[in-house]
Image (cartoon, rainbow, N blue to C red):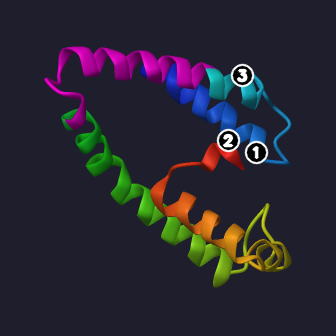
Amino acid sequence: MGIIRVALALAVVLSHLPPATFHFVSGGVAVQAFFIISGFYMALVLSSKYSSTSLFYSNRLLRLMPSYFVMMGVGAFCLFVLNASATVTPELLASAYRRQDVGAFLVLENFAVVGQELL
């Protein structure tokens, strides 16, 4: 199953690269299949390894958040220092953060990793 998840992740990366001409499955289908497989694994781990749900979520948080914040820092460096982004321009950021409520929501959902699917 690990090889299938790697192949699906590669399909998502290829779908985000404009110069890539080879796509063995569409990015949307790959994301949905990856979520289905990952959900199965998470349910399996939750039911067999952990005695409580809170222990499971605290372990997931401690495992995922450090790498999330490192990659958020790398992304911020690429965006603000190198001015390198395929999807965001300084003008787009300026217009998004012009309203305080929108800016607060963007900061909150990026740091809390909650609500990102709403955008």
* Of marks 1 and 3, the one in the foreground: 3
Name the N-terminal-most of marks 1 and 3: 1
Q: Is residue 51 above or below residue 109?
A: above
Contact between marks 3 and 2 (CB within 8 A): the answer is no
Instruction: State the separation of the CA atoms marked 3 and 2.
Output: 13 Å
Figure quadrant of the N terminus = top left
> 26 or 98: nearer the eye?
98
User: Which residue is denoted by mark 2 in the rendering?
Assistant: 13
Quadrant location of residue 21? Answer: top right
Q: Residue furthest front?
A: 101
The answer to whether 61 is drawn above or below residue 111 in the figure is: above
Please state the extent of the stretch shown in magenta in the rendering: 33-54
The amino acid type, in three-letter code, at marker 3 is Val
User: Would you say the residues marked 1 and 2 are in contact, meaning their CB atoms lie under 8 Å apart?
Assistant: yes
Asked whether, in this view, residue 70 is left or right of residue 91, the answer is left
Q: Amino acid at mark 1?
A: His
Secondary structure mostly seen in magenta is helix
Question: Is residue 50 rendered magenta in the image?
Answer: yes
Q: Disc 1 to disc 3, how far (Cα)?
A: 13 Å
Distance CA(mark 1)–CA(mark 2): 5 Å
In the displayed structure image, the side of residue 48 where residue 34 appears, left or right = right
At horizontal 69% and vertical 77% (from top left) the residue drawn is 100
* Discs 1, 3 touching: Cβ within 8 Å: no
Residue with the most extreme bottom position: 81
Q: Give x and y (percent) for residue 108.
A: 54, 63
Residue 41 is situated, as x and y percent measured from the top left of the image, at 38, 19
Q: Determine the image quadrant of residue 76.
A: bottom right
**Crowd tier of the residue under label 3, counting other residues whose Cα lies within 10 Å: few below 14, some 14–19, many 20 or above:** few
What residue sits right under mark 3 in the picture? 29
Per the image, label 2 sits on a secondary structure element best described as helix
Q: Which mark is residue 16?
A: 1
